[in-house]
Image (cartoon, helix red, strand yellow):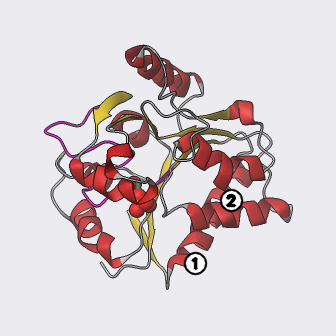
Amino acid sequence: MRIIKVKNYEEMSKIAADIIAAQITLHPQTVLGLATGSTPIGTYERLIELCNNGDVDFSQVTTINLDEYCDLDPTHEQSYRYFMNKHLLTKVNIDLENTHVPNGKAADIDAECKRYDELIQKKGGIDLQLLGIGHNGHIGFNEPSDEFVMGTHCVNLKESTINANSRFFNTTDDVPKRAITMGIKPIMQAGRILLIASGDDKKDILKKALFGPVTPLVPASILQLHKNLIVVTPLDL
Ligand code: PGA
């Protein structure tokens, strides 16, 4: 594990974007695993800037997102497809056909999970996976549980996650209660993992994840076993 300690959110975003841009420059056909949430927004802004300046070229890149709410249309402002299009994908020179987010509106959720796993496999796995961490240690929507779930699956979101996400909805009742998430296996099989976290409220869980016991009760703790994990954070660990 390599921890890059930075000054603040801005520097974290710049370094994370530079790592992603370097990956794309070295391997133009990179498969990027992407995340949503407030943490990566600055990273995406910086990537857009690099792309506009001609310093990174997304034309051959494929993106595979970690997760999506069930029952939200991709045009819904709080859907993760909408988020990705708004914060990155429609602002860089990527072919939108090569960008993937689970379909939370699929009539057959199990079939959709299977399709997503097959898609990841067909693309040869993820080269670089960008991750944030939830207050309960979740990665993607792999919530604390008594086992690590390997493949893409549908989860009932924990109350703490629903509450954390309610800031984006009119009322807590409007927050979807289920989501589709990539499992632990493709995350751990990614060539490189880039974990970013900022804000004092993330300090305790980040410490637990990186230095505590490896347990599905803190899903991000599995990342300790990855051979190429880079953590970029302004937090004192
Ligand atoms: P946040 O979410 O970036 O909005 O804090 C992170 C996560 O839940 O993975």
What's the residue at 45%, 56% (across, down)? 168
Residue 88, position as x, y percentages in the image: 68, 53
Q: Amino acid at mark 1?
A: Glu
| Label at residue 10 | 1
What's the residue at 49%, 62% (across, down)? 38
Looking at the picture, does residue 184 appear above or below residue 92? above
Any magenta on residue 115?
Answer: no
| Label at residue 23 | none
What's the residue at 73%, 36% (across, down)? 96
Which segment is the magenta one? 130-149
Looking at the image, residue 136 sits to the left or right of residue 78; the answer is left
Is residue 126 visible in the rendered image? The answer is yes
Residue 194, position as x, y percentages in the image: 48, 57
What's the residue at 40%, 60% (across, down)? 167
Q: Judge by depth and name the residue closer to the eye, 230 or 43.
A: 43
In the rendered image, which residue does mark 2 sit on? 22
Residue 1, position as x, y percentages in the image: 37, 62
Mark 1 closeness class: few <14, some 14–19, many ≥20 residues within 10 Å: some
User: Is label 2 in a helix, a strand or a loop?
Assistant: helix
Q: Quick check: which quadrant has ligand 1?
A: bottom left
Q: Judge by depth and name the residue closer to the eye, 20 or 218.
A: 218
Looking at the picture, does residue 43 appear above or below residue 163? below
Looking at the picture, does residue 87 appear above or below residue 60? below
Q: Amino acid at mark 2?
A: Ala
Query: From the image, which quarter does the C terminus lie in?
Result: bottom left
Which one is closest to the eye, mark 2 or mark 1? 1
Q: Main secondary structure of the magenta part?
A: loop
Q: Judge by depth and name the residue closer to the eye, 226 or 35.
A: 35
Looking at the image, residue 84 sits to the left or right of residue 233; the answer is right
